[in-house]
Image: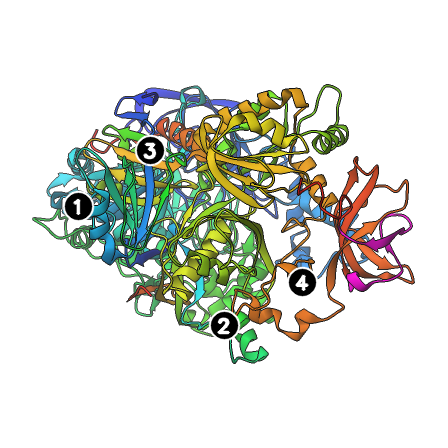
Amino acid sequence: MLLIPCPHCGPRAEIEFRHAGEAHLVRRTEGVDDAEWGGYLYARANPRGLHAERWRHIHGCGRFFNLMRDTVTDKVMDTGDAS
Amino acid sequence: MADLLDQPGIRVRRAPLEPLHVLHCDPDDAEALGAELGVTLPTAPLRAGDGAGPRALHLAPDEWLLVGWRGEAALTRPHALVEVSSRSLTLEIEGEHAVALLSAGCPLDLELMPVGAATRTLLGAVQVTLERQRHCFRMQYWRSFDSYVTGFLQAAASDLPAPVAS
Amino acid sequence: MRLSTGGRVDRARPVSFSFDGRPMTGFAGDTLASALLANGVHLVGRSFKYHRPRGVFGAGVEEPNALVGVDRGEGRWEPNQRATTVPLYEGLTARSQNAWPSLRFDVGALNDLAAPLIPAGFYYKTFMHPRRAWEKLYEPLIRRAAGLGTAPTEPDPDRYAQHWAHAELLIVGSGPAGLAAAMAAAPSGRRVILCDLDEELGGSLLSRPDAVIDGRPAWEWLESALATLCAAPNVRLLPRTTAFAYGIDNLVSLAERLTDHRPPAAATGARERLWQVRAGQVVIASGAHERPLVFPGNDRPGVMLASAAETYIRRYGVLPGKRVVVLVAHESGLRAAEAARAVGAEVKVVDLREEPAPEATRGRLRISGVKLRSGWEPCDLLLMAGGWTPALHLFSQSRGTVAWSEERQIFLPGESAQPETSVGGCNGTFGLDDCLAEGWAAGGDTGPRPSAEPGASGPSSPLARPDSADGRAFVDFQNDVTAKDIRLAVREGFRSVEHIKRYTTTGMATDQGRTSNINALAIASDALDRPVPAIGLTTFRAPYTPVTFGTMAAMTRGPLFDPVRTTPIHDWAVAQGAVFEDVGQWKRARYFPRAGEDMHTAVARECLAVRAGAGLFDASTLGKIEVVGPDAAEFLHRMYVNAFLKLGVGKCRYGVLCREDGFVFDDGVIGRIAEDRFHVTTTTGGAAGVLHMMEDYRQTEFPELKVWLTSTTEEWATIALQGPRARDILSPLVEGIDLDPESFPHMALKLGRVAGAPTRLWRVSFTGELGFEINVPSIHGRAVWEAVWEAGQRFGITAYGTETMHVLRAEKGYIIVGQDTDGTVTPFDAGLGWAVGKTKRDFVGKRSLERPAMLRADRKQLVGLDLPDGATVPEEGAQIVDPAEPTRAIGHVTSAYASACLGRPIAMAMVRGGRERIGPVAIAGEGAPVPARVCGTVFIDPEGARLSG
């Protein structure tokens, strides 16, 4: 069970969190064609290796934040990205 | 206060109902709003105010839980103030085995939780708000989860690990 | 036979037990295996496939043969227990497995005669014809002929505890290395947990009374070391505790056995405890397993590991045989020879570093002789010292990389992936002094460390490459895999260790290849002519040893499996005899049957009563979110499809929430309490999901908005009063609220008091009747409910449940998200296009709704179904077809009920191009398709007159 570094609460057990998908996806609703929009909805990088992703500390402060996780080793890197 | 559990080293009691409000605001406005409300809003994360009288638990960067505050206040900064006095029940857990009891279901390192700290966390399958005071832990949860929480604590109390160095 | 002195058993405390019905005696401190050997019982089981007679082989968890069932009475039957790890207690009842009618005369032994026909993988090549025979004949036969143990048939009556723990240092294994680490760490004040799966702490020292540490006999040193650790307030000692899983970020799972060493009558309390330990640092001191030797006939009762014999002699005071032959491929075997000699056995040492391995053995139910180069040597105990394999399981689970040492011919821990250190035997360190030094360093190195005579660690012998292709040279004893099987697998083209393992099943039994993996690898390496590391080790997976299901579940069982949530009205409904249904974690009253009523009649009565007079319904489970802030309206305007900016204070609007993909996600009525405050409702099941989605947008997409969200689901009890008499019932109870329809129209809300409690009174309806939803703080919920009930008596008020609620709303064509929608339905599909704000710049899902696929005319659309007179209620989910093309589905029934008010069944359905469809349709079912016609979704009062009264 991961120990996830919440930017506000410090390192906490994975069960207090909810994974929230790939990070840095930009919601642009105007001036995008259907293919681009479909990409925003469904296409994901799904890398083997470092993955920028979002987590939410749902049973804690409730904030969404970003971090990097290696999808092969499962190691989490605190990027200090509370955005 | 009714005793839920009373055995050597642990006592669990229901705390009386008291006014509860959730306050949300921009962290930069907290000091001013606190002054207008008449409650100190701790700025350090996961800290609870202490002393007698109304206090605030800083549960998230933009969120405080006001305990024991009532009345009207003219607040001059953008904020959300929502009464939740009916929403939750509170238990007080005290005794030398309090940490052991809660550790049956709470993943936090409770031995190292400082007095005056407060956070949302889990007890088994239920989200709770846990506050460590000088003499006890206070655990708050939504009222519909009462049968689960009390059942959980009672089951855990009957199977506590022996204290170290006994 | 039992020795008169020696060992750690307590000869002053005899213990009675039975095996296969035969009563025997042992001593406190025995295992079942040591006690059986003391009583001269050498035949303890029959092997898995060939049903060969088998005896005790090892002395610990590595045991592959001596598997028994233990009966602790009252539904506590446990098969496949290793007799070498079952602690003896008064009255222990054990039974052998896999033999019928008895161990001595086992019919299954015929398999042994058929052995040439049933090598590894035989079932991939046989039992194929005739194909029909597989299900009825071959499979049942094979299942009956093979297998280990019988499964218990009763539910587990024991309870299991659980505990989260945190320690700066977790040490797994309490042999010399682990103990040294604990003693080094204790003075620092760090929290230390030391666990060991054995009944006693001490590891290999328990079999080494002859060793000397710090100038003292090992057992004396051990006693004082344990006393020191016991007295340290920061050190927790956990014997009988197996570290079975090493998880990410140093979370190690331990299973502590609390009562299995006691007679059942004395076994009170939880049977086991699951510890989830988050450790700053882990020291793995799990030791090593001795390897057997591979030669023909190496599996008879009386053939055992040399170190096991040493343990039985030195730790348990039992001599397993009087004429001993010791096969030494590793010098540690000499210790066993010496131990046997010291207690009077006749011992012959065969040094396999100079001589070839034996050619054969004999003795059916117990070994009687071994054929060496010099000829047949009589013996009743044949010991194998094949070298030592570090126990790398936990290290491997921690995702450390295992490394092959060509020089030492063993696998060792390589690069760590987590904060852990392997010390002692599991690190390939075998000398006692070296183990103490390694452990001490890992524990923090403070102060003078315990030391023993520096001795040679003992070179590892070259890994034996048995060239035997004999079908009786066993590699995996538990799964009956021979050297020949492995060579067969290689011949048949299996080259990777994963394939060889699965084809032969070597290493796949409950002993997880502890004594077989390396030998199998050596044979495969030889057969493939490739070096061992090139073939590799299979992945070690948790659990290290089998873990009881009860421990895995721990407290998550029975009433604590999932929270059961109840509303403030619940107890009232129980007293009224309501029948409940589960809605997520909530219990909701489904209907309130009176004497003699079934659900159908109760629901019919309730429906008629609501439309004729008034009904009372508990809607407290619906989600509620208080949306507050200067930008609250703008936020809701962006989240929901509806236009919300202009919703007036004191007004309510039915809101539809889509996901970004344009499909309906949730719905609910939203009331504006103040300029900057909205009371949003959601479905019961959708409450958490809607709040989560709103927070996501609030924090991530719209961070510039000044709006905040608070869950108020449990702050308010919601009492729905519905029916033409609703206003009459409510009037006397309200304070400060004008109920006059001019002043209080449909879809409005007012604040005031009801029955003395503060209220947010909404005039809304899910039934199509005049209706109110009385929101009061939940501490007042019950009292207000009873006040309304009381006031309604003279108007014939009727309590109704979710079933009636479903029927009444369906009669009005109101959808239920998740029933009439399924995550692929847009607002337009569901006939809710009217709710979509036409001039809104943006809302969640808007962009998706513009896609051509979402606008096609042939999409499934929500319609009503007009059913012929006398028809039965269609099944929800039934497929709908065009009668002209009855094998192609054009839609499905989403909701269907018997309508008491209409006197006939009604249904809602999603049908392709439904709104424009002309002509009949049919509902497919078991018999002939039932004819129906598409119609509007509102069956009662389509003008809505009853609502606006």
Under tag 2, what secondary structure? Answer: loop
Contact between marks 2 and 4 (CB within 8 A): the answer is: no
Which of labels 3 and 1 is toward the front? 1
Q: Mark 2 lies on which chain?
A: A
Q: How far apart are marks 2 and 1 (CA)?
A: 45 Å
Label 4 belongs to which residue? Answer: C828
Q: Distance between the residues labelled 4 and 3?
A: 79 Å
Under tag 1, what secondary structure? Answer: loop
Amino acid type, callout 1: Arg
Disc ID at residue C316: 3
First in residue order: circle 1 vs circle 4: 1
State whether residue C13 is above or below residue B105.
above
Label 1 belongs to which residue? Answer: C190
State the extent of the magenta-drawn residues as a range. C912-937
Q: Residue C638: x and y, percent? A: 49, 63
In which image quadrant can residue C109 be found?
top right
Q: Does the magenta stretch include residue C931?
A: yes
Q: Residue at x 61, y 69 (%)?
A: C849
